[in-house]
């Protein structure tokens, strides 16, 4: 009798120790298709950003077995409505969760359209090495074979695993672990919608366990020189798209609206039309930062400061949308083109 009592006590102590060891993970809801609903399980049309983060979490109850979850609803929007005010609020929220000492990792549910932008902004600005994982879905929560619950389970598993520390901000979609510095959406409808076109994925999830192939080599989070703790707004930076016949109307209009920087989504290796070329030269002389990026998803723009691009900044492997974010963040520290070029090489 005494030994049965001892055994029961041991089981209770052991299981409560295992439960107590579960990591504390905050799941921050921002909206998107993962929170979307449709009138039927099979129709293509649906409404994103309908469900709360707690409702999304209840679709994958197995998550409760791996982590102690706190749901936080930051906003509930389609991610085409994402903006830098929400980015700053999100970065401040994540930093304060980690500063509290009670949060081991953060998962952010997000619409897929601008998920790579939010991930990259956080990659530059979060000051902790704890895992931060963004996750979404391509099918709404009510869809037949919805991808959200498994993506969310994988994201929480990834955030809960100590091996995910100090790897920068990551996106988890369709079993792939994707680094914020290179990830981009490459399919507007399929569940396999994201790639890292220049460096390849960081790894994959198998049965809730991460398998990493490589480390991110660019600076991020704990190695980042940027801090937004005292910052509540960012300078205006716009993107000018280059194409056959492109004139300088958009370029000049953005400058008139007060842009402090322009990113050019150039053709090929960061080239643009003669009209944009002369608008860019004038802007550079006026002290406006001009970044040469490319609308091509692989290869980047890597030559530095040669004529006719004197004083301009090469994007390296950043897409135009990520170059815009890096320039906005860089402008919190400097407007010196040589220094901004150094930043574009390192991040
Ligand atoms: N456009 C919506 C958004 O980005 C839905 C796309 C999605 O989440 O996959 O939030």
Image: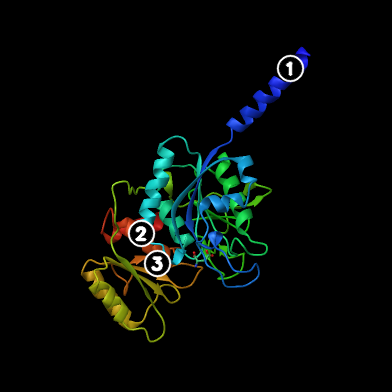
Residue matched to label 3: 303
- Ranked by sequence position, the earlier of labels 3 and 2 is 2
Quadrant where the C terminus sits is: bottom left
Question: Alpha-carbon distance for marks 3 and 2?
Answer: 29 Å
**For numbered disc 1, what is the local secondary structure?**
helix
- Identify the residue at image location x=62%, y=54%: 149
Residue matched to label 1: 5
Question: Which is more foreground, mark 3 or mark 2?
Answer: 2
Residue matched to label 2: 84
The picture quadrant where one finds residue 305 is bottom left
- Residue 122, can we see it? yes
- The reply to whether the C-beta atoms of the residues labelled 1 and 2 are less than 8 Å apart is no
- Identify the residue at image location x=43%, y=49%: 220
Question: Alpha-carbon distance for marks 1 and 2?
Answer: 59 Å
Question: Which is more foreground, mark 1 or mark 3?
Answer: 1
Q: Point out residue 206 in the picture as x, y percentages from the top left corner.
A: 68, 50
- What is the basis of the colouring in this image? rainbow
The picture quadrant where one finds residue 343 is bottom left
State whether residue 242 is above or below residue 75. below
Question: Mark 3 near ligand 1 (CB under 8 Å)?
Answer: no
State whether residue 10 is above or below residue 83. above
| Image mark for residue 93 | none
Identify the residue at the far bottom of this view.
245
Residue closer to the observer: 283 or 173: 173
């Amino acid at each position: 009798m005494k030994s049965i009592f001892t055994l029961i006590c041991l089981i209770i102590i052991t299981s409560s120790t295992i439960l107590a060891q579960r990591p504390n993970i905050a799941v921050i809801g921002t909206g998107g298709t993962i929170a979307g609903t449709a009138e039927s399980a099979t129709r293509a049309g649906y409404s994103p950003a309908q469900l709360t983060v707690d409702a999304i979490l209840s679709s994958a109850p197995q998550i409760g077995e791996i982590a102690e979850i706190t749901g936080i609803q930051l906003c509930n929007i389609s991610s085409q409505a994402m903006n830098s005010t929400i980015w700053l609020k999100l970065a401040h929220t994540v930093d304060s969760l980690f500063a509290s000492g009670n949060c081991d990792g953060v998962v952010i549910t997000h619409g897929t359209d601008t998920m790579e932008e939010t991930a990259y902004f956080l990659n530059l600005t979060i000051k902790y090495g704890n895992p931060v994982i963004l996750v979404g879905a391509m099918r709404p929560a009510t869809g037949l074979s919805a991808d959200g619950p498994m993506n969310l389970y994988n994201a929480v598993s990834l955030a809960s695993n100590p091996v995910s520390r100090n790897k920068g901000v990551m996106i988890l979609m369709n079993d792939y672990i994707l680094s914020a510095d290179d990830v981009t959406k490459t399919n507007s409808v399929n569940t396999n919608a994201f790639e890292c076109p220049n460096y390849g994925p960081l790894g994959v999830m198998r049965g809730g366990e991460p398998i990493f192939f490589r480390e991110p080599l660019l600076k991020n989070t704990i190695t980042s020189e940027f801090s937004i703790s005292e910052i509540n707004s960012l300078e205006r930076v716009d993107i000018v798209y280059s194409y056959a016949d492109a004139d300088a109307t958009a370029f000049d209009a953005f400058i008139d609206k007060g842009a402090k920087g322009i990113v050019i989504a150039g053709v090929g290796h960061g080239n643009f039309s003669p009209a944009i070329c002369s608008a860019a030269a004038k802007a550079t002389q006026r002290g406006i930062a001009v970044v040469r990026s490319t609308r091509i998803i692989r290869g980047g723009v890597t030559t530095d400061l040669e004529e006719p691009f004197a004083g301009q900044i090469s994007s390296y492997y950043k897409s135009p949308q990520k170059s815009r974010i890096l320039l906005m963040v860089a402008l919190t520290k400097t407007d010196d083109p040589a220094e901004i070029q150094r930043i574009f090489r390192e991040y």
